[in-house]
Amino acid sequence: MKHINMKDLVEQVLNALRQSGMREKQIKDYKYCGLYPICQYFSDTGLITYTKNVADEFILQIRAEYEQGKISRWKWNTVRRSAELLEKYHTEGTVTLPQLTQWEVLHNPLHQVPSSQLLLESNNLLVLVYQTKQELLRFGHREKTISNYVYDGFDAILRYCGERGITQYEKDAIDSFVAQTRASYENHLICRSVYQNVRKVATLLDEYHKTGKIELKRVPAWGLRMPSTYYTESLNAFCREKEQTGALAHSTISVAHSAIRNFLFELEDMGYVDFDRVTLSVVSECMSHTAKQYADGLGAMLFAIRSFLRFLHRNGTTQIDLSIAMPEVVAKRRVVRQGFGTGETEKMLCSANINSSIGKRDYAIMLTAIQTGLRAVDIVNLKRQDIDWRNYEIRIIQSKTGHPLNLPLESETGNAIADYLLNGRPKCDIPFIFLCGNRPYRPLKNRSASAMISRYMQRTGIDKSDIPRRGFHSFRRSFGAGLLESEIPLDMLSELLGHTHMDSAKPYLAVNELGLKSCAIGLTPTEKAGEGW
């Protein structure tokens, strides 16, 4: 269709909309708020026939009014959509339109694909932003998440750098912008989500600039102190060795990393920039200060730092083995933590919305923990092949001990897992059963599972109880205590819980009130000499 009267085109579009089954209310919106104003603009300019260039001129005027706050976003979108309907019908004879593309994406040069020549400049900021966004798309993030990153983060950083004439990637400039954004957040000028998106995008840009790829990981807490480059390289080398050799589990390495970092901070505060002048007495003094931060986890801290110092000596970084300055044993903690009561577990199970995919997942995780006593790390690592549906068994290799463990699969737990797999779990090829609910889909981590239980404890008011808890591990305590109350022998208890040593059952004995009462020695009356004669 070429030359057509503007009024005739508008009427043809309205008829096509009615034939498509569009609601009359929406047709009226297009008619009076979009199509008629466009037609009036043509009349005012003295034009009778439709041309796209004139319609685009009108759209630019309406856009300017929207940016000045003179019209609402709804009015702007209606006018723009009406112009698209006119062009679609004029060229193809149809009013079927794709989803409305955001105006900024079409007209903002920051959203355009860089030229092939510009793509050769790896340090160019526009190129870096484009390539980082492409990596995010490859991960399968939701469109809403990408949109938040683009408008809150990428565009904001590009505007900030553009105003200062910065075209190449400069970490200091972006760090300065992030600091300003943090100050705006602390002064309640912007919401937390905008600040978080800016920090996340800044972190992604720096990571892609350094490595040419991005990984999905948590952004460190704001103001988190990091050791010097020298100490950081030594710490990272230690963690890599433990991970490659499998000497320590991933979660253990994470805990060790934190403890060693605090030890290195003590060395820095004492003026030591490397290990050349560090002596046994220096290590002993550092440990005295570091130990104050680990009232409840001193044993794990000592183990981590001792392993690190042995690693330094083995690699020739230190001439002597500084680990001999560390105490070999630490006093055992005597805190007795109870598990959840039956009523408390019922509350948490009932608070899970099993009509949603997340609720189905949470319900299945909690029920598995309640009826098997498995650790959080073993539950989040469950794979389809670990469940023998025919024989009603769960068969795993424990993450903590590396030993195999076979447990009965209760029908209630099996049904909950099956319901999640069939009706709630995202469709993907990841072998793990329990996944994060948001894209990109990935396995849950035990830290996420612990945080989930904390939320349910808070939701049901259990976190306000006077009884000391440990979150997810309280399910395991409850399971063990229940076995003891059923008079299960201690060796069978250890077997069901996957213990490698019988001493591991002692905490469960300490909370078994009925068992302790039966072991108590009764009081017998005493008589003085000479009495009773």
Image (cartoon, helix red, strand yellow):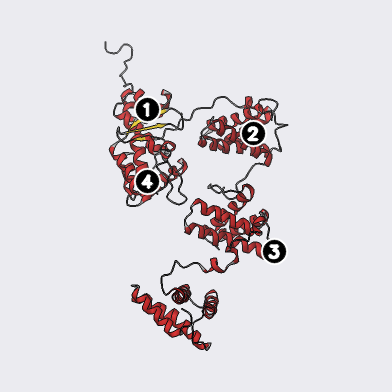
Which residue corresponds to mark 2?
A: 286
In the displayed orientation, state which residue is furthest to the right.
Answer: 277
Q: Is residue 321 left or right of residue 5?
A: right
Q: Mark 2 to mark 4: distance in Å?
A: 45 Å
Q: Is residue 520 left or right of residue 335?
A: left
Which residue corresponds to mark 4?
A: 361
Nearer to me, 50 or 318: 50
Residue type for callout 2: Cys
Q: Is residue 67 left or right of residue 311?
A: left
Which residue corresponds to mark 3?
A: 165
Q: Nearer the viewer, mark 2 or mark 3?
A: 3
Q: Position of residue 335 (x, y in %)?
A: 45, 33
Q: Which dot marks residue 509?
A: 1
Residue type for callout 4: Arg
Tell me, yes or no, if residue 176 can be seen here: no
Q: Earlier in the sequence, mark 2 or mark 1?
A: 2
Nearer to me, 390 or 239: 390
Residue contact between numbered discs 2 and 4, judged by CB atoms under 8 Å = no
Mark 3, secondary structure of its residue: loop
